[in-house]
Amino acid sequence: MKDIGLDERDPNGAVQAGVSMAQTTTINGERASTNRAFLRPVRHRPNLEVRTRAHVTRVLFRRGEASGVEYRDGYTGTLKRAYASKEVVLSAGVMNSPQILMLSGIGPKKHLSSLGIKVVKDLPDVGENLMNHVSSLGIEFLLPPGWPALPADINAREQDFTHFAPGGPLSSIGPEEVTAFLRGSGPSVDGRPVWNLRFYGNIPKSRGGPVCIPAPPQDPLYYDRILVTPVLLDCKSVGSVRLRSADPLAPPLIRLNLLGDEPGRDLRLLVQALQTSAALEDTPAFQRANLTLNRAPLPGCEQHAFGSTAYWECAARTHTLNTFHTAGTARMAAPHRPGVLDARMQVRGVPRLRVVDASSFPLLPSGNPNAPVIMLAERGAHFIRQTWGQAARGAQDK
Ligand SMILES: Cc1cc2nc3c(=O)[nH]c(=O)nc-3n(C[C@H](O)[C@H](O)[C@H](O)COP(=O)(O)OP(=O)(O)OC[C@H]3O[C@@H](n4cnc5c(N)ncnc54)[C@H](O)[C@@H]3O)c2cc1C
């Protein structure tokens, strides 16, 4: 990456563009989930109760304020209720928080009425502004023969995972350890990077047609090629989440709309990113390592000359990669701007109801969203403590 002019930097520092070791939410060689990092250490608290297989079907209201939730108990199949003494916090994620809001009568009036749902609060932006990063699976570099060696007994090697984990060589994230943020040639918002180049160890069988993620590999342990995915961070295409029906157990209607912006800007930038990625073949580092671009045409793009703009457009459109970095379907906004939440993540016009998850983001982070969601949740916890700490202090003062 230094060969293409990138400096080594901390991407969470003052300037994000550059190359670095990827920062991960891991501890002692193992990925640390939010459950492990935040919930397990406080499981003993008497004021914490975790109910599993509880599917929230709607928010309950008393005198126009959120007062609890109704949920389906997956063990008994019955509907139950849980009441809040202070407030209700939805954290069901980008697809399901807006779904629960709409099932509860909070959302675009016309849409809710068309499904026979009683409108509690007309908020046209619920489910809108579905943002996501987009990439393509179009670029593979082949490792030189014999590096790393694919052992003949590859399928018998699964014990390597348990033998070395945690903390052993196989607990590394492999080529993903390198991550690069690039500004691109055009103007970027606030000097933020436009692309993130990511590198994955790949195996031949995972390249298999117009799918969003590589098909499950049969030989899971070793790779003989590196997949370069240029992730477009500054996407303009937005989709939406709507209800399919008033049935709370029906999956919502999700329109991702990747590469769907009208002027085709996202497609153009992704094509530039694919071209930049392919050109890595000419860098001294790739030449030294004898990494060669796989010029076998992608399935569905054989009609285009490899490397032409039409070919890369086809690669972007046919082998589109959903990065699962979705956000924004219940976004925070200033009072005069379209949005769902105020700056303290409270639902506009519905007292005692907050949404704290990736749906609350007003803009898409210029990087992976997991750590920013954790930060957002810390901020939400701070707001909740502030609100109810102040209320408690106020009561004491009276
Ligand atoms: C396959 C995949 C890979 C990813 N890899 C990365 C990565 O490497 N790095 C990164 O930074 N980000 C990654 N992400 C994105 C990251 O996981 C999300 O940004 C993050 O988890 C969003 O957090 P959230 O709290 O908004 O929602 P979630 O983590 O989705 O949490 C929502 C929770 O609500 C529950 N829920 C939903 N509906 C209901 C309901 N009706 N009743 C009760 N519970 C409900 C869900 O089961 C879920 O547990 C990945 C995402 C996916 C899908």
Image: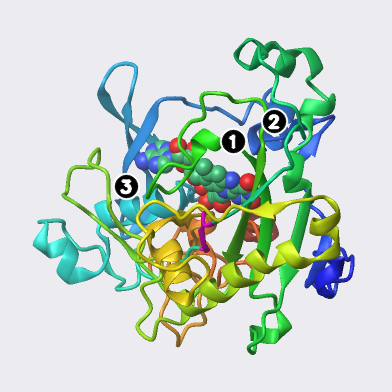
Q: Nearer the viewer, residue 374 or 385?
A: 374
Q: Nearer the viewer, residue 114 or 206?
A: 206
What colouring method underlies this structural image? Answer: rainbow
Marks 3 and 1, the one that precedes in the sequence: 3
Q: Can residue 371 be seen in the rendering of this structure?
A: no
Residue 210 pos. (x, y %): 37, 50
The amino acid type of the residue labelled 3 equals Leu
* Contact, mark 2 vs mark 1 (Cβ under 8 Å): no
Closer to the camera: disc 3 or disc 2?
2
* Beta carbon of the mark 3 residue lies under 8 A of ligand 1: no
Q: CA distance from mark 3 to mark 1?
A: 50 Å
- Give the structural element (helix, strand or loop) at label 3: strand
At 35% from the left and 34% from the top, the residue drawn is 55
Q: Nearer the viewer, residue 284 or 195?
A: 284
> Mark 3 sits on what residue?
60
Query: Residues in magenta?
Result: 133-138
Category of crowding for the residue at label 3, using alpha-carbon neighbours closer than 10 angstroms: few (below 14), some (14–19), many (at least 20): some
Marks 2 and 1, the one that precedes in the sequence: 2
Residue 245 pos. (x, y %): 16, 49
> Mark 1 sits on what residue?
203
- Give the structural element (helix, strand or loop) at label 1: loop
Q: Quadrant of residue 4?
A: bottom right
